[in-house]
Amino acid sequence: MTLTTRQAITLCAALTACGLLLVPSNFPGLEGDARITLGVFVLATCAWVGTPIDDTYVALGAGVALTATGVTSAEALFSTLGDETVWLLISAFVLAAAVARSGLAGRAAAFLVTGARTVRQLVHLTTAALVVTAFAIPATSGRAALALPVFLALARALADRKRLVVALALLFPTVILLSAMATLIGAGAHLITVSVLWETTGERIGFHEWLLLGLPLAVVSSHLAAEVVLLTTTRRADRRGPVRVTADDLQAHSEQPVTGPLEPGEARCAVLLATVVALWCSEPLHGVPPALVALIGAVVATAPSLGTIRLKDALATVPWSLLLFMAMTMAMGVALSESGAAGWLVGGLPGGEGVPAWLFLLVVVAISTAAHLVLQSRSARSSVLVPLVVASALASGVDPVAAALASTAAAGFCHTLPASAKPVALFADVPGTPTYRPGDLLRLSAVLGPLSAALVLLFALGVWPLFGVSP
């Protein structure tokens, strides 16, 4: 039997984990709970990287193992499901279902896209529309599914300009992935990062703090990516021609009206969404936690005769598997920190307090940017990287918040292969519509990857300090 490179690495790492569990004398300073925690952590990472086993199943197994061995108490394990961030995500998904059912998304797309008169206007207006969806839809895969009908309508209207259609096919998943950094609910990985920081350092990043730090980066990186897509996919002649996308083109792929006066349900949903986002952003003024605001909004959105969707139908859209994954990886992160395993692991790395902050962040950003080639799940990447990054930052004298945010933002780049992220895979194969080939994706990644990493480093060193997060 011939092993692939990934299988060989996984086998070696698994054997290392078994050694951690069975031969503690080989690792001075790593004993008891720390040894068990690190062994479970390495085994879980091996399973995520090198096996087809479901990520959530692996996380559940790790959580059970840590509890059964006494590293984590049962109360601590189960309490992760009641964490504020989990309730925030549940409520956000209910709100997202109400928005999707109301038809507001189609109206917003029609309002922006139909105003384009040039190719560059079309691309950047589409980018702006996709960035805005990060406030309404709390998962990149959900945003991709919501945006697919808009792409199909645009592809139909531009059927005679194949290269432009291919550019749009690349643009949609690229912007969806990069713009997720705009909000705390943009990706489950963000909530994992917030939880690890809270449990490890006692620092809580709220919705408005994340907005201040993440939204500018999301906007700049998304529009920069739009330009890169244009330059790597189209020719000058493709970009010079005028475009005209009408409301009828978008209406053909939407069950709800995209123009005309708002229906009563749409108006109520728009007011509710605007109120919820405004309350999230103004948390320092009223002190109501974002999770409670989202829960109240979810109750209103599903209220009989007032909401736009039944509670039963809205709850059916919640990715319970993702929530379980988040809860178990939160428990793993806490165990890594409290047992001393994370400190021991990073203690053997070269450096220390004498390492310049810029060099530390450069290494973190580089590793996090490339991590999607090994760990395809964004949440799994944060579960593995963030606890180690935070522990390393504390040991090196670097602000752990800046390091964790930089790692999470850099890990949002996952465009190299169609299988690197669900939105990329969704737009890679659209029946009846020309889309990109693996070569197009690699050409985009070769340019966008270094630019994205450099932009995250620039924000971490030059922009975030303006908001009090200085490395």
Image (cartoon, rainbow, N blue to C red):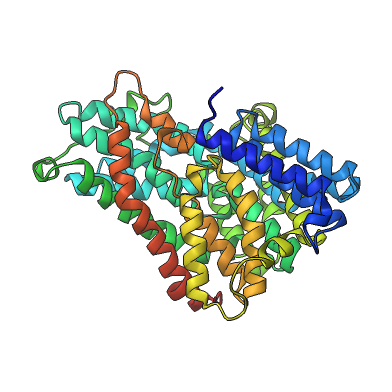
Give x and y (percent) for residue 2.
Answer: 53, 25
Instruction: Classify residue 157 by image quadrant.
Output: top left
* Identity of the residue drawn at 26% across and 29% down: 155
All told, the count of numbered labels is 0
For this view, does 182 lie left or right of residue 395? left
* Identity of the residue drawn at 13% across and 40% down: 238
The residue lying toward the viewer, choosing from 107 and 379, is: 379
For this view, does 383 lie left or right of residue 141? right
- Please say if 369 is above or below 357: above
- Please say if 257 is above or below 133: above
- Please say if 73 is above or below 28: above
Give x and y (percent) for residue 132.
Answer: 44, 49
Give x and y (percent) for residue 319.
Answer: 64, 34
Determine the residue located farthest toward the top in the rendered image: 432
* Identity of the residue drawn at 43% across and 27% down: 256
The residue lying toward the viewer, choosing from 124 and 389, is: 389
Give x and y (percent) for residue 279.
Answer: 61, 59
Does residue 358 appear in the picture of this structure? Answer: yes
Quadrant for the N terminus in the image: top right
* Identity of the residue drawn at 16% across and 39% down: 243
Does residue 264 appear in the picture of this structure? Answer: no
Quadrant for the C terminus in the image: bottom right
The residue lying toward the viewer, choosing from 258 and 88, is: 88
For this view, does 39 lie left or right of residue 192? right
